[in-house]
Amino acid sequence: MTDDARQRWQQRYDAALAAGKVRDADFTTLSGVEVAPVYGPADESAVPGFERIGYPGEFPFTRGLHATGYRGRAWTIRQFAGFGNAKQTNERYKMILAEGGGGLSVAFDMPTLMGRDSDDPRSLGEVGHCGVAIDSATDMDELFDGIALETTTTSMTISGPAVPVFCMYLVAAERQGADVGRLNGTLQTDIFKEYIAQKEWLFAPEPHLRLIGDLMEYCAENIPAYKPISVSGYHIREAGSTAAQELAYTLADGFAYVELGLSRGLDIETFAPGLSFFFDAHIDFFEEIAKFRAARRIWARWLRDVYGATTEKAQQLRFHTQTAGVSLTAQQPDNNIVRTAVEALAAVLGGTQSLHTNALDEVLALPSAKAAQIALRTQQVIAEETGVMNVADPLGGAWYVEALTDELERQAEEIFTRIKDMGTDGTMTSGILRGIEDGWFTGEIAEAAFVYQRALEKGDKKVVGVNTLTGSVDAHDTLEILRVSHQVEIDQKAELAERRRRRDDAAARAAVQRMVEVARTDQNMVPAMLDAVRAEATLGEICDALRTEWGSYTEPARF
């Protein structure tokens, strides 16, 4: 990097300032000391390898995507929420938005995540418990009643039945009178991480990838701002992986989706910006910051040098973060407020674009209204009181952070090589599919989880309230948690039966059959699926028809 790197940053910052893209705010410390938008070395040439660090807004984006950092735009406060039925969750969404939330993030119940209707025998006892129950487009209407989808960014955390659920979201927007082409949000859709970690799939990998390819095409052509895939490392980390494994497996999955888009003839400059990421913010403060910085740098380099992306927008890694659910403890649950604050601060210092903070009671149940508000306020205190938004990448150039960033990048590159070596054609996709088939990913994660558990049991790693400092003045107090009544399931099943009675049943069944016929061709399946959803076909009916056509997937037994 030449000595004018600082000047290039200054030109970008000045342009943003002139365009009104810098917030009108007080950029001073609590004591009134004015701070600069960014800091760097007095002599760039005196810092070996400075081109790998650089300035915010410049390749390889180690220090962030924008020259302005959070001076330009704060991260989106996007609280993950969903429980009971659509009406109950709608009330929670309105509370989140009224209290300062910047976007919505939908949590679905287990039957929905598995593509089952609420009256399916396999849904018994699970309806509305780990998220909201969604059976048809009418539930989506109720979920977003009074919330303008055209102007509210919405994230949906679902992978196996992601495409039919997305179609229900589009139909709900249509019924609101929204311009569907202007919708903005994120659909998780990441099926690779299901086979690697979370285990919520419907079919074998190949038909899932066909659906994902169709979704990528449809969004690129019709809803350009919408991000059809959120590549998830969160669930990989929650399953027990190390930070380096989370980083490497997630980016490898992202590379495979790039390969999928290219195989479909899509323009990388168009579809790559529609790939977003979802990371865990765990409790090791500096390691997490380094992980986020390394992720941006690796992605930019691979997109440019391996896959040929030439525009900055296509090279930039955008990500949402959630604080670590597995770091929460049932013992002394108030400690979880502190853990969440530390993890959220790491995400912010790592440059996240949006953030969910876990509630103190999520280790026991879905959040109560009070716990959800504390989680929301945690982000707001960080944003409004700490001064972290005043300076872009304030830890850039710190010896420890830069060394950790380099080390995590090195470990990730070693893992990429191992994954590609497992394949047969030199692609990341081939290596991932072989690693899934052989149980390599699950084995590596299990080993990492075992090593950490042993360290806890030996006392080498400490968790306050669990294996150290276990005394408590309120040891006998009980935490009031949110409980979802069984009546939710009874009512949801009754409503579903009435909905089927009211619809044009023949039209719904014919639309599902037409979707299956399209599945037998190379046509894009999204339009036919939309027609089935408009006819009020249920999620279970759509997914069961595709299970019949494509078969179900059962993970091979391994010992």
Image (cartoon, grey):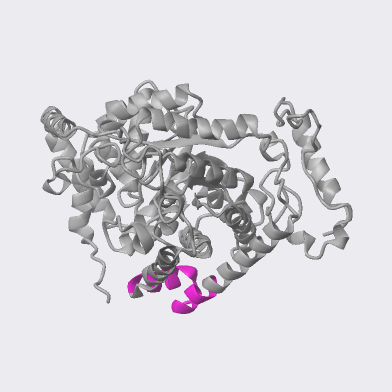
The mark tally for this picture is 0
Give me the residue at 35% from left, 72% from top: 439
Residue interval drawn in magenta: 416-437
The answer to whether 299 is drawn above or below residue 74 in the figure is below
User: The C terminus appears in which quarter of the rendering?
Assistant: bottom left
Q: Who's the residue at 49% across and 61% down the image?
A: 461
Task: Look at the image and tell me whether residue 426 can be seen.
Answer: no
Chief secondary structure of the magenta portion:
helix
Direction from residue 462 to residue 35 in the image, left or right:
right
What residue is at 23 percent from the left and 52 percent from the top?
517
Q: Position of residue 476 (x, y in %)?
A: 31, 38
Quadrant for the N terminus in the image: bottom right
Q: Nearer the viewer, residue 445 or 297?
A: 445
The location of residue 82, given as percent across then percent down, is 33, 35
Q: Toward the viewer: 58 or 290?
A: 290
Say if 315 sits above or below 347 in the image: below
Residues 460 and 66: in front is 460
**Would residue 109 be found to the left or right of residue 281 on screen?**
left
| Vertical comparison of 57 with 400: above or below | above
Residue 48 percent coordinates (x, y): 81, 65
